[in-house]
């Protein structure tokens, strides 16, 4: 069952999203050669708590840290620890919080120092794919429009989308209906309605879409060892189109609500 949110609930989610977005710039800045992934976790945990929220991932199905940090061939769900970030790494950061009963979920991949042209292209295409998907999050469209737009954009660039993990509805729970795959056909139900809130998150591999789980029970890696990147926003579908909730510029009600997607393609 899809929980449609009221305007007031979307405002609350925008507040949660805005706080979560504010954690990204300091995290990005901290992604320097030599930093331990656990240090990135500590920064995010502290900033989330200082904002009055709860780090959502900590303890979620037993996850032991407050954020996920996944490097290079690690696609998603990496556990922060003593590994040090190195020059040229692609560091994917996935974080969520709960504020006033509502979740926000966001993710970025950061290139550390000088990265290869292919890695840079992977980053760009993956971030573009997120916004291509967000642009389809409009009342009257279909969920499959989002999925297929992401898949087409990624595959046109010669990359692949991970199949085993998908985006999701979000609200009072991190994972609500519907699932939001990064592959599919336009026109596939459900129909998109005002009040739906979705975590859209293209997970893109430079090589094959196949992945496997490390023995730690969490970290998902590319089967062929190729690089992987990932970007995510929590988005509300409004009468005026998609509204990115996990933006530091998140428009609260009455301040241009629903008028922007912060599209880097524009
Ligand atoms: Mg998510």
Image: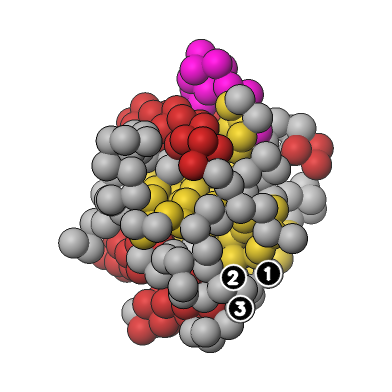
- Looking at the rendering, which quadrant does residue 127 occupy? bottom left
How far apart are the two marked residues, 1 and 2, measured between alpha carbons?
A: 9 Å
Above or below, 259 against 16 in this view is below
| Residue linked to disc 3 | 189
**Nearest to N terminus: mark 1 or mark 3:** 1
Tell me the quadrant of the picture where the N terminus can be found.
bottom right
Name the residue carrying label 2.
181
Residue 48 bears which disc, if any? none
Q: Which residues are magenta?
A: 42-56
Q: Does dot 1 land on a helix, a strand or a loop? A: loop
- Chosen colour scheme: secondary structure
Q: Is residue 46 magenta?
A: yes
Q: Residue at x 79, y 50 (%)?
A: 217
1 or 3: mark nearer the eye: 3
Q: Which residue is mark 1?
A: 164
Please tell me how crowded label 2 is: few (under 14), some (14-19), or many (20+) other residues with Cα within 10 Å: many
The answer to whether the beta carbon of the residue marked 2 is less than 8 Å from any atom of ligand 1 is: no
Residue at x-position 53% and y-position 53%: 195
Q: Within 8 Å: ligand 1 and the Cβ of disc 3?
A: no
Where does residue 198 sit, x and y in percent of width and height? Answer: 55, 55
Query: For the point 33% across and 43% down, which residue is it?
Result: 257
Categorize mark 1 by other alpha carbons within 10 Å: few (<14), some (14-19), many (20+).
Answer: few
Label 3 Cα neighbours within 10 Å, binned few <14 / some 14-19 / many ≥20: few
Residue 166 on the magenta span? no
Give coordinates of residue 61: x percent, y percent. Answer: 80, 42
């Amino acid at each position: 069952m899809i929980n449609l949110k009221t305007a007031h609930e979307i405002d609350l989610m925008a507040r949660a999203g805005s706080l979560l977005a504010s954690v990204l710039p300091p995290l990005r800045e901290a992604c320097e050669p030599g930093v331990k992934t656990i240090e990135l976790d500590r920064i995010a945990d502290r900033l989330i708590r200082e904002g009055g929220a709860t780090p959502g991932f900590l303890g979620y199905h037993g996850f032991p840290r407050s954020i996920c940090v996944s490097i290079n061939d690690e696609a998603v769900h990496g556990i922060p620890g003593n590994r040090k970030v190195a020059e040229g790494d692609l560091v994917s950061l996935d974080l969520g919080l709960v504020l006033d009963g509502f979740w926000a979920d966001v993710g970025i991949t950061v290139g550390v120092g000088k990265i290869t042209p292919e890695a840079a292209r992977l980053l760009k295409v993956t971030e573009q794919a997120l916004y291509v998907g967000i642009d389809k999050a409009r009342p009257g469209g279909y969920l499959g429009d989002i999925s297929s737009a992401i898949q087409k954009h990624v595959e046109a660039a010669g990359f692949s989308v991970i199949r085993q993990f998908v985006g999701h509805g979000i609200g009072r729970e991190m994972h609500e209906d519907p699932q939001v795959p990064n592959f599919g056909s336009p026109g596939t139900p459900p129909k998109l309605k005002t009040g739906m809130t979705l975590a859209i998150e293209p997970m893109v591999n430079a090589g094959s879409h196949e992945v496997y789980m490390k023995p730690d029970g969490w970290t998902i890696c590319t089967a062929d060892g190729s690089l992987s990147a990932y970007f995510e926003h929590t988005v509300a579908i409004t009468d005026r189109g998609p509204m990115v909730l996990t933006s530091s510029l998140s428009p609260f009600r009455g301040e241009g609500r629903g008028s922007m997607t912060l599209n880097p393609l524009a």
